[in-house]
Image: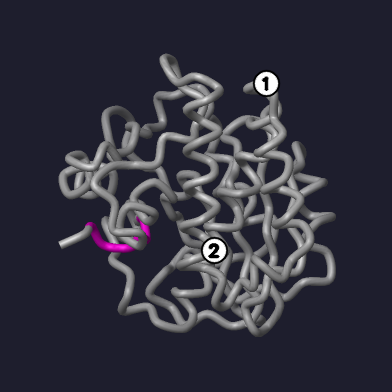
Amino acid sequence: MQVVGIDLAWGTKARTGLALTDANGRLIRSGSVITDAEIAEFLQGSTPSVIAMDAPIIVTNPTGMRDCERELSKDFRRFHAGTHPTNMGQPNMQPEPRARRLTKAHGWSTDHTARPSPSSPIALEVYPHSSMVGLFGLDRVIAYKGKRGRTLESRLEQFERLFDLMELHCDDPLSLTGTDRWHELRHNAREATTASRLNLIEDEIDAIFCAYVAWVFTTTPAALVTFGTAEGGAIITFPPPA
């Protein structure tokens, strides 16, 4: 079954990362776009059973944190992988979360307890930071994101670490080392001379990792844990290290 990973920008101006596999889980294309129309164009002709999105899909609470965020953060905060709060009081959630709008536009179910298929695809909310901690057995998140206090040199080092860990853990089935685009991404990261050059590929890499989580959900769902509920919002992730 094909799966899709989407690192979705909450608004409509930042870039969204996208990744698509074939029916055997091999990465066949990835990239980044901006508009909903470009997302639809990227997905044209595909028949994914699971779409894993790094973005809030179901948000019903008017203020504060969702239960799924609170529960996940309780388990992952010690790894510096807690989530930010999401609620309908935030302007970028109005009139509804962008991820929810996409699920409606494409006819994707948001019930993670249902059985996925090409004719009944399911959209999952995932969180790469917590899943990377769990899958890679880390004691804290990989600091490759652009944040205050992180230098270009430190991010380059962390990007290299992320590429290595993804090749070690995700090459089967994604076949990253056999994919031209993956090698282009590694080259672009190594040759980046500004933070903006790293930011251009960050979303695409996250989307590829989201696709891996989607594949695990279709093949070995017991390897993942769920925080929250389908009705109030659920986040699917690898469990924290023992």
What residue is disc 1 on? Answer: 194
- Amino acid identity at mark 2: Glu
Query: In terms of image quadrants, where is residue 27?
Result: bottom right
Q: Is residue 230 visible?
A: no
Kindly identify the residue that appears in the image at 54 percent across and 63 percent down.
167
The residue nearer to you, when weighing 133 against 115, is: 133
Kindly identify the residue that appears in the image at 44 percent across and 74 percent down.
217
Q: Is residue 223 above or below residue 16?
A: below
Give the number of the disc on residue 167.
2
As drawn, is 107 to the left or to the right of 110? Answer: right
Determine whether the residue tagged by mark 2 lies in a helix, strand or loop.
helix
Residue 65, given in percent of the width and then of the height, sits at 27, 35
Q: Is residue 167 above or below residue 190?
A: below
- Amino acid identity at mark 1: Thr
Residue 16, given in percent of the width and then of the height, sits at 67, 41
- Residue count near mark 2 (Cα–Cα under 10 Å), binned few <14, some 14–19, many ≥20: some
**Quadrant that contains the N terminus:** bottom right
Q: Is residue 57 visible?
A: yes
Give the number of the disc on residue 159.
none
Of mark 2 and mark 1, the one earlier in the sequence is 2
As drawn, is 227 to the left or to the right of 220? Answer: left
As drawn, is 188 to the left or to the right of 114? Answer: right
Q: Is residue 61 above or below residue 43?
A: above
User: What are the residue bounds of the magenta stretch?
Assistant: 235-240
Residue 231, given in percent of the width and then of the height, sits at 34, 58
Residue 238 part of the magenta-drawn span: yes
